[in-house]
């Protein structure tokens, strides 16, 4: 009896280890040298405003709940490029996702969300975005994730997509803050850190 229980326990442990090994994890970062963390955070905290900051996202709207409250769900979509001569009218959805806000902490300047449905091959995906203060007066955006392998993607491909996204978000926040202050934006540095 003990050997059967030990074998079952070992089998369960091996299955858990295999599942952990099949998880993708990674982090990408972008510097906002001219924007203090306190100024960058409201842009990130506005959960249903992703289309303002992430190129390729044409639609970001509240699908359920109250914007900015845990449990709310946003619908994000990328639209197909307009056909020649139609002026962009009647563009169809190329890809979409529904993302639930899991937690938001204004003091820590961090939010976490999960993809709860998509057309892009995502199964379980949990991401977070944090605004981290830098000693020089600027800040960094840190986008981290953990997910099941995504159908049709490689880990490097996903990291590359998120890296481009965090760079673009940082640049657009810098531009918005510079416009609000009446000054030109500074260029930002970006680092990519990955863990498989």
Image: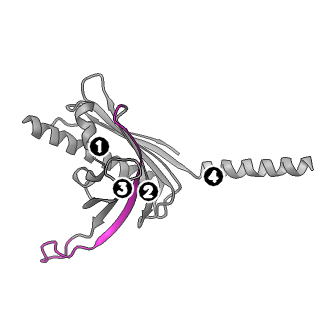
Where is mark 4, residue-wise?
19
Q: Which mark is residue 44?
A: 1
* Residues drawn in magenta: 82-107
Work out whether 30 lies above or below 138: below
Q: Which mark is first along the chain, 4 or 1?
A: 4
Q: Nearer the viewer, mark 2 or mark 4?
A: 2
Label 4, label 3: how far apart the Cα atoms are = 32 Å
Where is mark 2, residue-wise?
115
> How many neighbours does mark 3 have within 10 angstroms: few (below 14), some (14-19), or many (20 or more)?
some
In the image, is 30 to the left or to the right of 3? Answer: left
Asked if the residue under mark 2 is in contact with the one under mark 1, i.e. CB atoms within 8 Å, the reply is no
> How many neighbours does mark 2 have within 10 angstroms: few (below 14), some (14-19), or many (20 or more)?
some
- Given residues 33 and 49, the one toward you in this image is 49
Disc 2 element: strand
Disc 4 element: helix
Q: Which mark is first along the chain, 2 or 3?
A: 3
Q: Quadrant of residue 28?
A: top left
């Amino acid at each position: 009896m003990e050997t059967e229980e030990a074998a079952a326990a070992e089998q369960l442990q091996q299955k858990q280890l295999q599942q952990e090994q099949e998880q993708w994890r990674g982090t990408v970062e972008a510097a906002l040298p001219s924007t203090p963390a306190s100024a960058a955070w409201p842009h990130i905290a506005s959960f249903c405003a992703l289309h303002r900051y992430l190129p390729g996202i044409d639609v970001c709207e509240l699908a359920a709940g109250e914007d900015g409250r845990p449990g709310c769900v946003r619908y994000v979509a990328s639209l197909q490029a307009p056909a020649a001569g139609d002026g962009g009218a009647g563009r169809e959805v190329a890809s979409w996702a529904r993302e639930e806000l899991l937690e938001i902490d204004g003091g820590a300047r961090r939010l976490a969300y999960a993809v709860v449905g998509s057309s892009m091959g995502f199964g379980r995906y949990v991401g977070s975005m944090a605004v981290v203060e830098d000693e020089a007066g600027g800040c960094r955006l840190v986008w981290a994730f953990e997910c099941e392998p995504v159908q049709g993607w490689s880990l490097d491909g996903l990291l590359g997509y998120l890296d481009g996204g965090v760079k673009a978000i940082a640049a657009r926040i810098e531009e918005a803050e510079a416009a609000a202050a009446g000054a030109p934006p500074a260029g930002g540095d970006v680092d990519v850190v990955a863990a498989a």
